[in-house]
Amino acid sequence: MVLQVFLRVLAFHFTPWLPVLAMIRQLDTIRQEFYMLITPLRCQIVLLAALILPGVASPLGDRVIETVSISADEAYEDIRPDILHFKGHFIMQSRDWHLEAVRATVYGQPDKPDKVYLEGAPARFQINRDQSTGLNTVEATAPVVEYQRSTDTLKLTGGAMLKLDDEVIRSTVIEYNISTGRYRAEGADGVMIEVPPPDS
């Protein structure tokens, strides 16, 4: 008897709220589906990016204005803010740099990301430098390439290769500071450096 009375009181107080609770649950589902929406068609994004180019071009910095284009087969937003995921034929490029990957994650604003994480076979990160610096092209390839804007560094993991004009460095892990032009390579199989003979 007491249990029946308790259940009636409970139903009396909570029944008017059931439609409201259902609406909240439905809105939450819609919000999650919106954030995880995958674009089935090839994604094309053209952005106005701010790049640091103080003589030594920093690929994803914030001074000179130029156009940045991003393309991929699919793109979707993460539930967490300011994170974009791309799948299939990812390309991100401007006048001074070119990124390619099978999968990519861009953290922060796409026109000035805090971090870019690339995966491929291999993923590629190429920088075309100002000739006045004495270094024309930097090309980095690895199964995993990670760029950090705060330190202006690339980290290559796996079968990593770093090409500085004609000099080629190969190792399991290579870290390269774009601002200073210095690298560090290490791995279980050691490091191989190829330097062409000087022009005669």
Image (spheres, rainbow, N blue to C red):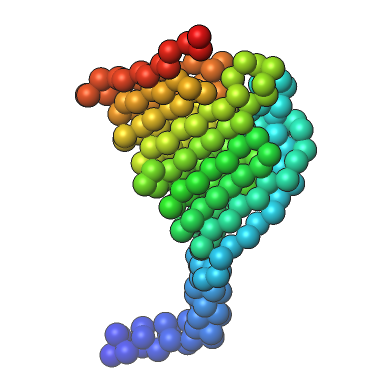
Name the side, left or right, on which 154 lies relative to 60: left
Question: The N terminus lies in which quarter of the figure?
Answer: bottom left
Q: Which residue extends farthest front?
A: 200
Residue 101 point in image, percent of width and height: 46, 48
Q: Position of residue 177 (x, y in %)?
A: 51, 21
> Residue at the location (36% across, 32% down)?
160
Dividing the picture into quarters, in which one does residue 64 lie? top right
Q: Position of residue 95 (x, y in %)?
A: 68, 39
Vertical side of 199 occupied by 59: above or below: below
Q: Let me know if residue 95 appears in the view.
A: yes
Q: Is residue 3 above or below residue 179?
A: below
Residue 83 appearing in the image: no
Q: Which residue is at a point 52% across and 77% down the rendered structure image?
A: 26
Q: Is residue 199 above or below residue 14?
A: above
Q: Is residue 32 left or right of residue 66?
A: left
Residue sitting at the far left: 188
